[in-house]
Amino acid sequence: MPGFPVIAYVAAFLAALAGAAITLPPWRSFCARHGWVDDPGERKIHAVRTPLAGGWAVFSGLAMALLLGAAAIAMGWGGADAVRWMSHGMGRRAVQLVAVLAGAAAMLGIGAWDDRKELRPGTKLACQVIVALAVALAGVRITLFVPSMGFSLAVTVLWILAVTNALNLSDNMNGLCTGLAAIASMAFSLVAARHGQYLVGTFGFAVSGAFLGFLPFNFPRASAFLGDAGSHLAGYLLATLAILPHFYSERHGALRPAAVLLPLLVLGIPLLDVAQVVAWRTLHRRPFWIGDTNHLSHRLARTRLGRVGAVVVLWSAAALLGAIAVLA
């Protein structure tokens, strides 16, 4: 069968990028009118009330790209080969894709609720567990070569919680979480595309495009923030994008069993950051869920780099790790 047309990846990426950029201004106005804003504070770096519109714009861009993709399949746009490949992928992964999208909407809602009401840590964690467990039960699971449903469910839930909260914690400087999400999702897309997992690759390119569509509104100066809604969405999408590709299978013999560790490389920067922050807070007998200014970004910003330089350095490190994972 002929190869999958690369134009489908480009279309998904550009549609999501344009969708996020186009919908951000109305979402920003909506959030400002209805009080969905982040006020200046002791640990905040902004001086004015800023709408928490980023998550909604990213989700809108992703939704627009997926709707365009569905229309393309239904109408036969892009050629018979593209339709054949995508229809094959949908036939195998339809339930998983629906579960991932439903989970994304749920995580967006949890974050938006937290933005508005500032949920208790236990309440927020319980909601995250419910979403992660539902997605795992729908078939989006990690196995690590262990033939146990209980093990698979537990590891998957822990993974989704870890990555979701790592990205949530990384949202502490303009553009940092948004850029990390765009870079990591691009890396996962390229890995999936390289190994013939076209539906996953297309979805990942759409995710990357949606975050890049929001980035100009968030960096270097921010007219809108991701908010907990956006950072929850970012972490959840990256966690599931790390699960969806088959990083190792007997059919793809070029991949070694150790390739299942590639997601740790792609997400190395946010995972390293959350690990060192939790360790620091534990050593100093502080609750790990209470924010401070000891993230990697804060430490770098206190050097000559400043905030913008710190973000660029962390983006660059994430891009380097992502490139290694893609080429591995």
Image (cartoon, helix red, strand yellow):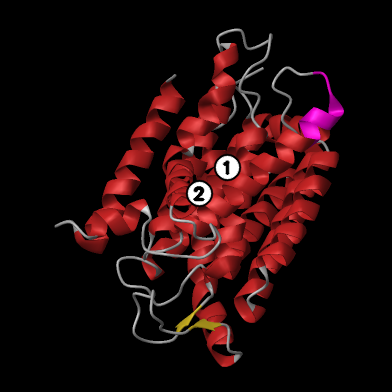
Q: Residue at x 60, y 13 (%)?
A: 257
Q: Position of residue 50 (x, y in %)?
A: 44, 82
Amino acid type, residue under disc 1 in the picture:
Gly
- Work out which quarter of the rendered image holds the C terminus and state it: top left
Residue 261 horizontal/vertical position (percent): 55, 24
Residue at the (18%, 56%) spot, across then down = 305
| Residue 17 position within the rendered picture, expressed as x and y whole percent measured from the top left | 49, 57
Q: Residue at x 85, y 40 (%)?
A: 137
Relative to 305, is 97 above or below?
A: above
Q: Quadrant of the N terminus?
A: top right
Q: Is residue 234 above or below residue 266?
A: below
84 is higher (above) or lower (below) than 63 = above
Q: Residues within 10 Å of mark 1 (few under 14, many from 20)?
A: many
Image x and y of residue 146, in percent: 76, 19
Q: Are marks 2 and 1 in contact (CB under 8 Å)?
A: yes
Residue 210 in view? no
Nearest the eye: 297 or 234: 297
Report the magenta residues as a range.
Answer: 147-153
Task: Determine which residue is flagged by label 2.
Answer: 208
Q: Which mark is residue 170?
A: none
Q: Which mark is residue 204?
A: 1
Classify residue 174 by image quadrant: bottom left
Regarding residue 93, the answer to whether it shows in the image is yes
